[in-house]
Image (spheres, rainbow, N blue to C red):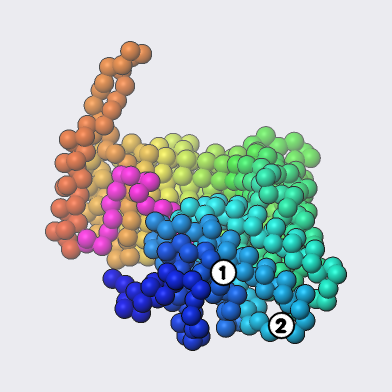
Amino acid sequence: MDSLLFLCARRVAAQRPLPALPADLYHVLFQAAFLDGRPLVLHDLVATWPFPVLNMQRLVGHRELLRDHPSQDCVEAVIQAVVAQLRRELEEPGCDFSLRVLDMTGLSDSVAGRTTTGLSVWCSTKALAKACVEVAAVATATPQSPGVDVHAHLFVDRRSYRILRDALQTGAASSLHLKCREFKAVDISASEIVTLLESLDPSCLRRVELCFNNLGLTGLSVILPHLSRFPELRSLKVRYSNVDVRHLMPKSAMRIRSVARQLGMLPSLRELNLGSSQLSGNLPWNWPSAPSFPLTSLESLELGYCFLVPADLTFLSQSIHAPALKMLDLSFNNILRGLLEPLQLLLEETSASLLYLDLSHCHVADSHLAALLPTLLRCSRLRFLGLYGNSLSTAAIKDLLQKTLELPDLHLVVYPVPEDCYKPDQQESGWDFVVDKELLAATTVEISQILENSGRTDIVWTYNPCVHGVLDYFSL
């Protein structure tokens, strides 16, 4: 329920021009105007902002409050208000404004490309880039102002590459200083990625995501040396980038050793995602001549759809990373390829720290789950378990439920539709299997009843992987 102060703020924000305001009302008025979709009012508030910092995520509130509220026009209004302030400072020396930092981070889900409000990170990146170029054009003929630092997540693809490149390269002349916290590049070349990375402030970047860029091992080896200039880089995700090292030629073997050395030069790295890279026995750091990778232990490792073989998991279980891992994603790797025993060893080593485990689509059957259960129960801090897309029976799922009730922190389990909840259905092309909705509903009720009777209604058990977003246990 809204507070009386917030309800009053909504009434005030509904009128324009705004009356004279005391400084302590700006924050609640900003929130009310943003949630009610009033870009002109937001522009006026930012134009007279009485504080040195404007942190939009803190002002707007929790993301779940934003789902039904428009935001693109509101965010662009805030940007344009800052541009107007900088133009006045450049054109009218002596103008005294308080605002010096605009923090736009936290409005998006990491660098996923779209916020929960429907505002694409691409749109906000483009708006910021245009603003930088606009302010730089004014600054060429006027004295430089103190400027405003804008902390943001940047999303770049072929549509936004040129304007972002121009904005970053004119940064020295612009009094609007882009400070990139998270950088995501999609479908651009390695050389274009390098051009942008070279223009980013090295003190700010925490996360880099590169996907669908067709980099291959060659492109990755070109990019990695340029990441060493970012001392605070914590997370690197390289997904769907055509990295295939299954059949190494001598030249490729040398290159992967180089990649291992370059990864070892990222001392703050805590999260690595190599999803959909075809590794198969050639994890980039699994080389005797390579330095320990990285220099400190990883906390989050995602190797989904990487064609892993037993040697990969065995190496990980013996590495310095296993005892520190909080998040482990091995989805879409086939446990039938001899992965069961090395997976047990790996889980033993991670049991004291592991919070998140995803084994979705790993061909896990009842017998595999029974073998893994004793080790899973040692993961006393486990919060999430993903088993979607595996062939498990109702009996095996209920057994898992009963035994994992002892895990105090377990919050979410995504299980597969039990294989005995399918029924045959004859199609024109032959027999197929469809979900028996009555059987599935009965199983769902039974699971809920077990949770209620055990007093563990705090745990969510669901067969729908789309209902709950990915839980991110990697904290920056």
The quadrant in which residue 357 appears is: bottom left
Residue 340 percent across, percent down from the top left: 43, 44
Mark 2, residue position: 95
Residue 465 in magenta? yes
Q: Is residue 422 above or below residue 68?
A: above
**Residue at the location (43% across, 53% down)?**
470
Mark 1, residue position: 43
Side of 405 relative to 110 (left or right): left
Q: Classify mark 1: helix, strand or loop.
A: helix
> Which mark sits nearer the N-terminus, 1 or 2?
1
The quadrant in which residue 29 appears is: bottom left
- Quick one: label 1, few (<14), some, or many (20+) residues within 10 Å? many
**Split into 4 quadrants, where in the image is the N terminus?**
bottom left
Q: How many marks?
A: 2
Whether residue 237 appears in this view of the structure is no
Q: Amino acid at mark 1?
A: His
